[in-house]
Image (cartoon, grey):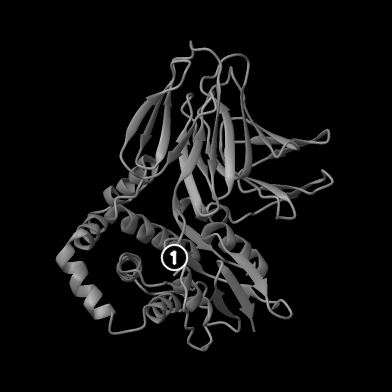
Amino acid sequence: MQYSQIQTSLRMAALIGRHIKGELNTTETQELQSWIDASPENRVMVEELMNTAIRQTEWENLQQHNGEQVLAAILNKAAADQKIKRLRFIRLIAAAAILLLLGGVGMKLVLDGARTSPGRTAQYTNDIPPGGRKAQLVLANGNVVSLGVGKDTTFTEGNGTEIKQKKGQLIYNNDGRNTLAYNLLTTPVGGEYEITLADGTHVWLNASSSIRYPTTFNGKERKVEITGEAYFEVAGNAQMPFKVKINEQMEVEVLGTHFNINGYKDEATVNTTLLEGAVRVKTNGQLQLLKPGQQAQVNSAGGISLITNINTEQVVAWKDGLFNFDDVSLQEMMRQLSRWYDIEVIYEGKVPEMRFGGKMVRNLSLSQLLRVLEQSKVHFRIEEGRKVIVTQ
């Protein structure tokens, strides 16, 4: 089976699982519905997996085996067997992935026929839950509102802008006639959130990130400022260009597009990755125009490097509720985990030189995730004070 087919199957499995849990946003719901409508077989499969009785039966069967090994075996077979039927593979991987996701068991999605080596069984006396939908909104008058996935609410900013909190995201409604005011949305370590700006632009904020934006857009441009990581789906408006300022040091000018910006201070470069449309990266008087599938990396000195053929699915995996560790170093992986689980990572002895592959859902507890990683030659223990010790 082709790699792209495996990727599509994994994506659909994740969407079906999140649909069962009621966590899909509007864009994801449309994506899943389009896939369901593409064939009668797809529709039947989803209807079966939505059936509680069928899921319970398959879950009881799956519990007789090691969940991670079941997934690894399915994926390894698909990578090796070019004749495996696409629908049969999707049915297998969707069932296993969804049942593991709903059942709270860690899952390792091993791609390209990779094999895992046996490791010692990890025992953890402490555990840390995953991050979730939470943020703080600072209004123009300085008042702070705590946000989450609780009861949907509607409130009004001082300039008359209507703000709705609905299913873990903020939605602004402004006719453009209200006076200019700025809000600040901030996610903590272990938090994420979504926002639809007054112009219809949709923004996802990763953990430990922020976006400062006007509650209404008027004038000659639309401009926002971010820190950390954010994914944008910008509403088109040729008469009012959209611009993003990152960490007070660089700017991205949007020409109608979907793109991701990773500007965490503990990363070596600020990375702007384009999925659709076009963007222009500006820093220190330099300009770099991006095409879809390209990434602009800006170093601390302001130099720009253009990287082509980027795995965009890996870049935005966080937005889709996944960790994608394909060809990721141990230190890169642990930086991602530290932001999502709000942990301090300590290396005991020399930092192991190794790279990982595969995917995991982000709703696992830390101990569940570490048990899967223990299949490699690296080991972990969780100590008081949200500390994770890494050893070989």
Q: Is residue 219 left or right of residue 65?
A: right
Quadrant the C terminus occupies: bottom right
Looking at the image, residue 240 lies above or below residue 232: above
Residue in the image at 45% along x and 56% along y: 321
Question: Could one spot residue 340 in this view of the protein?
Answer: yes
Residue 107 in which image quadrant: bottom left
**Residue 38 x/y as whole percent:** 30, 50
- Residue that protrudes farthest toward the left in the picture: 53
Residue 64 in the image: above or below residue 58: below
**Which residue is found at the position 49% from the left and 12% from the top?**
178
Q: Position of residue 358 (x, y in %)?
A: 52, 69
Residue drawn at the location 46% of the way across and 79% of the way down: 125
- The quarter of the picture where the N terminus appears is bottom left
Q: Does 289 sit left or right of 119 as displayed? A: right
Q: Amino acid at mark 1?
A: Ile
Name, please, the residue furthest toward the top: 177
- Residue 187 vertical placement versus 77 (above, below): above
Q: Is residue 108 visible?
A: no
Residue 368 relative to residue 244: left or right = left
Using residue 259 as the reference point, say whether residue 268 is left or right of it.
Answer: right
**Tag count in the figure?**
1
Q: Quadrant of residue 154?
A: top left
Closest to the observer: 247 or 8?
A: 247
Classify mark 1: residues with Cα within 10 Å, few (<14), some (14-19) or many (20+): many
Label 1, secondary structure: give it: helix
Return the x and y of residue 266 as percentages of the image width and height. 70, 55
Above or below, 304 relative to 114: above
Q: Position of residue 293 (x, y in %)?
A: 61, 48
Residue linked to disc 1? 6
**Residue at 59% across / 69% down in the picture?**
387
